[in-house]
Image: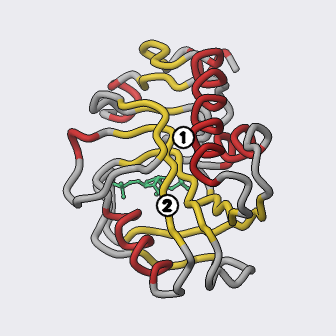
């Protein structure tokens, strides 16, 4: 992974810090759901790593499902609504549902997705995010369960990408500006 690591300015969150936080978030969710069954929705692709780690720590019965969405707009600023590229396979009506995301940025993707899923009448709908970048928020949305609040830096690793690369890094790192300002 040397070729990837050369492009990392610095490590923002280590593998160990993330692992400890995942356990804390799982415990908090456990206190909230109190043994009820929950549909955990992994939003592809960035959440895969967080989802897989979190899912192995949660103390309540869970059903896993996956969605792939694409926000309209281009570049690093997402648009105002989402297109569903892959939908859930389970019916979430009357179920407790938690969306698991890697990052809450402008909030455009998640606020639109939230509305779409709420229309399916789940018993409850919550949002769990590993990272929150509040400086970039344009929509009034916040995570119900949160890992870390981070500064407005271009972060990659632990599922997060730049042009589909860097997802495999085991930590969250800040990408060198020279990589994306070429
Ligand atoms: C990321 C992330 C959220 C969204 C957050 O996904 O997983 O879905 O962007 O941005 P927003 O708050 O500004 O809407 P991305 O579109 O990069 O896709 P990926 O998960 O496949 O990498």
- According to the image, label 1 marks what residue? 160
Q: Is ligand 1 within 8 Å of the beta carbon of the residue shown at mark 1? A: yes
Quarter containing the N terminus? top right
| 116 horizontally vs 158: left or right | left
Height in image: 53 above or below 127?
Answer: above
Q: Residue at x 64, y 80 (%)?
A: 92
Of 47 and 93, the residue lying toward us: 93
Height in image: 116 above or below 52?
Answer: below
Q: Residue at x 61, y 43 (%)?
A: 31
| 143 horizontally vs 136: left or right | right
- According to the image, label 2 marks what residue? 126
Camera-side mark, 1 or 2: 2
Q: Residue at x 69, y 84 (%)?
A: 91
Of 9 and 40, the residue lying toward us: 40
Image quadrant in which you'd find residue 123? bottom right
Badge 2 crowding class, 10 Å Cα cut-off, few under 14, some 14 to 19, many 20 or more, is some
Q: Position of residue 164 (x, y in %)?
A: 57, 47
Rendered image: mark on residue 36: none
Q: Secondary structure at mark 1?
A: loop
Height in image: 20 above or below 51?
Answer: above
CA distance separating discs 1 and 2: 21 Å
Q: Residue at x 23, y 45 (%)?
A: 136
Height in image: 19 above or below 53?
Answer: above
Of 14 and 114, the residue lying toward us: 114
């Amino acid at each position: 992974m040397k070729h990837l690591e050369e492009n990392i300015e610095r490590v923002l969150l280590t593998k160990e810090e993330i692992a400890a936080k995942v356990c804390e978030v799982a415990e908090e969710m456990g206190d909230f759901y109190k043994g009820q069954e929950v549909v955990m929705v992994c939003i592809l692709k960035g959440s895969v790593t967080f989802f897989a780690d979190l899912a192995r720590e949660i103390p309540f019965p869970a059903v896993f499902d996956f969605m792939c969405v694409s926000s309209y707009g281009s570049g690093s600023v997402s648009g105002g609504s989402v297109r569903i590229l892959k939908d859930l396979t389970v019916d979430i009506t009357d179920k407790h549902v938690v969306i698991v995301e890697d990052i809450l940025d402008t909030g455009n993707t998640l606020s639109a997705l939230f509305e779409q899923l709420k229309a399916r009448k789940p018993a409850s709908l919550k949002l769990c995010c590993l990272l929150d970048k509040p400086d970039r928020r344009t929509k009034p949305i916040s995570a119900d369960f949160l890992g870390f609040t981070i500064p407005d830096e271009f972060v990659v690793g632990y599922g997060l990408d730049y042009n589909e690369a860097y997802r495999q890094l085991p930590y969250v790192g800040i990408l060198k500006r020279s990589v994306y300002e070429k």
